Image (cartoon, rainbow, N blue to C red):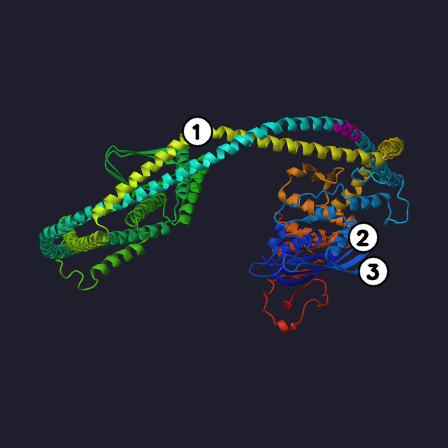
Amino acid sequence: MRLHRIRLRDFRGVHDREVTLAERGVTVLQGDNEVGKTSTVAALDLLFDAADSSRRAEIRAAQPAGVDAGPEVEAEVSTGPYRFVYRKRWLRRPRTELHVIAPAPEQLTGADAHARVSAILDETMDRVLWRGLRVEQHTAVGQADLGGQDALTRALDRVASGAARPDPTADDGLVERAVEELRRYRTPSGRATGELRAAEVRLADAEAEEDRCRAALEAVERDVAARDRLDADAASVRERRRAHHAEVAELEDRWAGLQSRLREVETARGRAVLARERAQTAGERRAARDALVGALDTDAEAVAQADAALAAHDGEHTAAREERAARRTADAAACEEATAARRRADDAARAVSAARDRAELADLAERVRRVEEAEAGLAAAERVLAATTVGTDDLADLEDLARDLLRAEAARDAAAARVELTAPAELTLEVDGETVVLAPGETRTLPVAAARAVSLPGVLDVRVRPGLDEAGRDDAVRDRARELAGRCEELGVADLEAARVARRRADDAARRADEHRAALTRELAGHGDAAALRAAHHAVQDRLDGPADLFTSIEPAPAADVPALRREADTARDAADAAARRADEAAAACRVAEDAVRDADTRAAVLAERAADARHAHDRRAEELRAAREAEPDADLAAAADERLATARDAEREHEALAAALADDDPDTVEARVVNARAVDERLAGEAARLEREHAETTGRLQAAGLEGWHDQHAAAATELEAAGRDHDRIARRAAAAQRLHDTLARHRERVRRSYVAPFRAQVERLARIVFGASLSLEIDEDLRITHRTLDGVTVAFAALSSGAQEQLGLCARLACAALVDPSDGVPVVIDDALGHTDPARLSRLGAVFTAATAAEGAAQVIVLTCTPERYHGIGAATVVPLAPSRRPGDRDRDAGPVDDAPLQAPGTVVDLPRAPRAG
């Protein structure tokens, strides 16, 4: 299968875009996130699999947000001998259109188009391989399941046999013929087909027909027995109905006599009820008159109480107003006192702040001074350290040289001759040109390691020379002395003692530098550096030198008085808080007084309204009573009530007497027996009708069965069942033989298939060595899955490799499969944003892998979708298609015309198309 172009309309975030792909080699679709790269592959799946009437979740998710339009996909595809353009739209005015271009033109729509494309893909494309050669976004590349792919198996068979291409006219061999023979009887999934299926259907039909005929005969026998039973039951029901008719007649007569007496009792009861209702009405009218009189007295009492309550409330109302005036005066005084106290507390707080700032300013000034002294001392110490040329190691070298000189002198003096000079009296001599004064009796010993001159001026000159050994030791002393002097000269000091002095000065300077640094750290704590400390000093100074009126009312105070000022400020603040509380209490009391006055006003209004209402109700009730007495005096009303009550009692006594006489004859029992007798008669009549109906139905079935000839049909069905069984056994034996032959050949061919591993491994190793080097070798199992990798003599299981190495080998396996499969069987390799675990060096090598896998004539089609194009810059023969966000409707001129007739674009191009105006 080859994809030539794909067009999306209103699909997720893509409004209208057409992408044309290279028919062979690598096409890289690159763009930022959410430009619709992954949507392109998802759209192809929906186009091939989902009918336009489908409303499954993937299709609803593809509908663009905020646009009343259905997602639409169009693709131009080649597969096998077919080339077609397939378009489908869902949800809004769904439609499906198919235009077959080759080998013969066809135009289909709707379900026919969907079925035709499915048939073409099933015929020409390995759908399992199409899924296996795809790498989905955000999933590890891993290994594809290639072991059972028919297209790859045919390719490996062709490579193993040495054939360049399969010959469709050639004999496929014994296995294919065995498969063809087996397919006469069973499908690839094992279901029966052909002769075997027909034999099974015939046997099943024969068994069903024989069962049907046997069941019909059994039903006839059951109907014969049922008709005899129905005849006996009908005779029994008729006898029972004749016996029941006499009992029903006797009960009906008794019930007719009782019904006239029941009507008399009911009439008497009606008269009693009517008389009782009239007596009750008269009693209610009399009670209403008495209630009206009582209510009038109650209203008069309510008027008196309301007037008394109103008069009593006047005193409370006046007291509440007086209390409110007093509370208002107290509240005003408390507010003034609180304001003055708050002002005094603020002045005291500002005084404390000013004193604290002055104290802080003095502290910061002293710290600045100490910092400046420490900085000056540190600079001086660092200058001494910079000027010092004698290090600790240098001093150690000088001391070693001095010790060597002392040892040489000691060796020289120990081995040299000695001259002892003793003066009997004070004597002045010159020894080697140096004046020496000897006290009386003093002895001076002179070692003779070199020529020495002793002179008594004006009297005697003595020169003493050593032997050869002493001269050599003296030379050693001079050498050590020259070494010591040379080293001192290099270090810029006069001698060892000067070096020691210089070193002591340097150590002292380093100690002072450490002390000064510690002082700087201590003084700068909390400020970071000297600049920050000086800035804090300036900030405090600026606060003290701030607005002129800020501290005008505050007398300057020394730092020592800050605690006293703070105590005064606390006292003033407490006084202000107390005054504020007193003000709040006065305000609360004032509000309570205000509420009391408002309540008193409300209470007075309510009491006045109640008094007015009570007087109005009393007047209305008095007028109502007067009118009622004029219409009917109280005496007439009482006489009428007594008369109607006596009449009601007479009517009730008459009803009770008639009802007692009727109850002796038990009419309820007679009625119940009559109703039951009628129900029994109806039930027996229904049962007789049912038996008659069932008898007629059974007779009809027996007559129909006699016409069917079930005995003959059952005999024929049994004969057909026997013949069908023999035929099925014969064909089943042939099918079993074909199955056994196929299984045997397939088992042997499976052993042959193991030889397919070699050409597949060779192709994968050819591509993988570009990435890993020439020492790579792979172990691949019979399912064409990589099990181990050997590199530089080290073998590692595939599962133990790093994620990067696994995805690199997985990609090489997919590209090797695409390179091996015949173009007529192949499918595009789709890689959606993979190689995230691959380092830059191997990414450049993988570019060569893509080129090597797609360099041959008729090479596979590889489609790469990525938002990081630098991963694929190493593919030399790639066709790069940049994707940008598609334009929304209205971004271009709508007069550009409809897009349905847009020409095909060159490979590797993207066209953002304007939306065609909608009809209607």
The percent coordinates of residue 607 (x first, y second) are 16, 53
Disc 3 marks a residue whose amino acid type is Ala
**Left or right position of 457 against 576:** right
**Left or right position of 372 against 692:** left
Image depth: mark 1 or mark 3 in front = 1
Dot label at residue 663? 1
Q: CA distance from mark 1 to mark 2?
A: 107 Å
Q: CA distance from mark 1 to mark 3?
A: 104 Å
Residue range (magenta): 219-227
Magenta stretch, main secondary structure, is helix
Query: Between residues 703 and 499, which one lies in front from this camera angle?
Result: 703
What residue did someone put label 3 on? 104
Disc 1 marks a residue whose amino acid type is Ala
> What is the secondary structure assignment of the residue under circle 3?
loop
The percent coordinates of residue 56 (x first, y second) are 63, 50
What residue did someone put label 2 on? 824
Work out whether residue 748 can be spotted.
no
